[in-house]
């Protein structure tokens, strides 16, 4: 039987409940804990994150969070486990790599594909370092419409790991405005599939931007990918408005793809060393999806059954393996 791999252990899909499938508890730089030393206050950060995430849990019943933070963005699996314990929730953490221009580690870019595969598989099967905390999803990313060399390197390795383990892949997408099939999210997925990955085990994130290329969005839906609208609450940084999101989601539902839609906020519970100015004024929070966006979705005519599919049923069909 497939199980979802959380930082507190494997669970049955039915135990996932209401799920946020694309979030970040903490964003930092890869060596933040080592660099800051005694100034790295994990207990303080956990309390801040719990204060933000808590209302989503207590007021709206969120039970599972998928934290798609790779190591070079400050992933702290011990912190993630602490938050999961404090709030009595499930958190799935990620192995994998982020986009090349935003910090893909040089040391990995010059290693062989086999070495990348071994690293990701070890974090899934055995755990991160000596923590025993295992990863339950692979995170990949593209910098722009065309995959950069280090990104393609990681994509190929991840496809092999997915074939061996069955674990889901989450792609930070880019290039939605490019209509050619050789660029953008379609090309990223095509590369994974050409290396043996299962498209029905792939979540394409940031589909909020797909209004620029709905044809690509529907092509990805047709081959079985999950489509994540995970910038809910954001209207800048390349994201569309919630009204545009509702239009895209409604189009997918009308096309028969309601079972492949994911909803999340891509929110960060805390940043190190501090929140950047561009983020301070965004006023995002972990309960925002349920408090502000889902009422808009219902008002637009989306049934309660479909809302349940999106928030509960769809994530539990992707992340267990």
Image (spheres, rainbow, N blue to C red):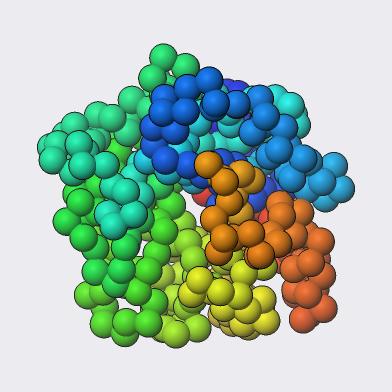
Residue 307, relative to residue 236: is it above or below?
A: above
Farthest residue in the right direction? 59
**Depth order, front residue of 6/222:** 6
Classify residue 104 as left or right of residue 170: left
Residue 192 in sight: no
Residue 129 in sight: yes
Classify residue 250 as left or right of residue 218: right
Picture residue at 31% right of the left edge, 84% below the top: 179
Picture residue at 37% right of the left edge, 82% below the top: 177
**Depth order, front residue of 201/286:** 286
Picture residue at 21% right of the left edge, 42% below the top: 106
- The image shows residue 91 at horizontal and vertical percentages of 61, 36
- Where residue 265 sits, quadrant-wise, is bottom right
Query: Total label count?
Result: 0
Classify residue 181 as left or right of residue 128: left
- Where residue 253 sits, quadrant-wise, is bottom right
- The image shows residue 171 at horizontal and vertical percentages of 40, 56
**Depth order, front residue of 150/271:** 271
- The image shows residue 44 at horizontal and vertical percentages of 67, 29
Picture residue at 75% right of the left edge, 73% below the top: 297
- The image shows residue 123 at horizontal and vertical percentages of 38, 27
Farthest residue in the top direction? 130
């Amino acid at each position: 039987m497939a199980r979802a791999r959380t930082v507190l252990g494997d669970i049955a899909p039915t135990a996932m409940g209401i799920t946020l499938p694309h979030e970040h508890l903490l964003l930092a730089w890869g060596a933040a804990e080592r660099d800051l030393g005694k100034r790295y206050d994990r207990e303080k950060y956990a309390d801040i994150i719990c204060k933000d995430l808590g209302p989503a849990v207590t007021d709206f019943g969120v039970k599972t969070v998928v934290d798609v933070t790779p190591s070079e963005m400050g992933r702290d699996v011990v912190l993630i486990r602490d938050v999961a314990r404090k709030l009595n929730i499930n958190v799935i953490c990620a192995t994998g790599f982020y986009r090349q221009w935003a910090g893909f580690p040089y040391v990995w870019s010059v290693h062989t594909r086999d070495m990348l595969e071994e690293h990701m598989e070890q974090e899934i099967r055995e755990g991160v370092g000596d923590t025993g905390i295992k990863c339950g999803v692979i995170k990949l990313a593209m910098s722009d419409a065309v995959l950069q060399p280090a990104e393609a390197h990681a994509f190929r390795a991840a496809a092999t790991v997915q074939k061996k383990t069955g674990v889901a892949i989450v792609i930070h997408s880019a290039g939605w405005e490019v209509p050619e099939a050789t660029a953008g999210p379609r090309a990223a997925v095509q590369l994974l599939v050409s290396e043996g990955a299962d498209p029905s085990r792939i979540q394409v994130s940031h589909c909020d931007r797909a209004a620029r290329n709905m044809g690509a969005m529907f092509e990805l839906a047709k081959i079985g990918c999950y489509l994540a609208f995970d910038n809910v609450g954001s209207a800048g940084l390349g994201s569309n408005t919630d009204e545009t999101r509702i239009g895209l989601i409604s189009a997918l539902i009308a096309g028969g793809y309601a079972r492949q839609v994911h909803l999340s906020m891509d929110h960060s519970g805390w940043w190190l060393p501090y929140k950047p100015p561009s983020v301070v004024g965004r006023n995002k929070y972990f309960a925002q999806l349920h408090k502000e966006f889902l009422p808009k979705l219902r008002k637009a005519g989306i049934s309660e059954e479909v809302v349940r599919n999106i928030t509960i049923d769809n994530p539990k069909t992707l992340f267990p393996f």
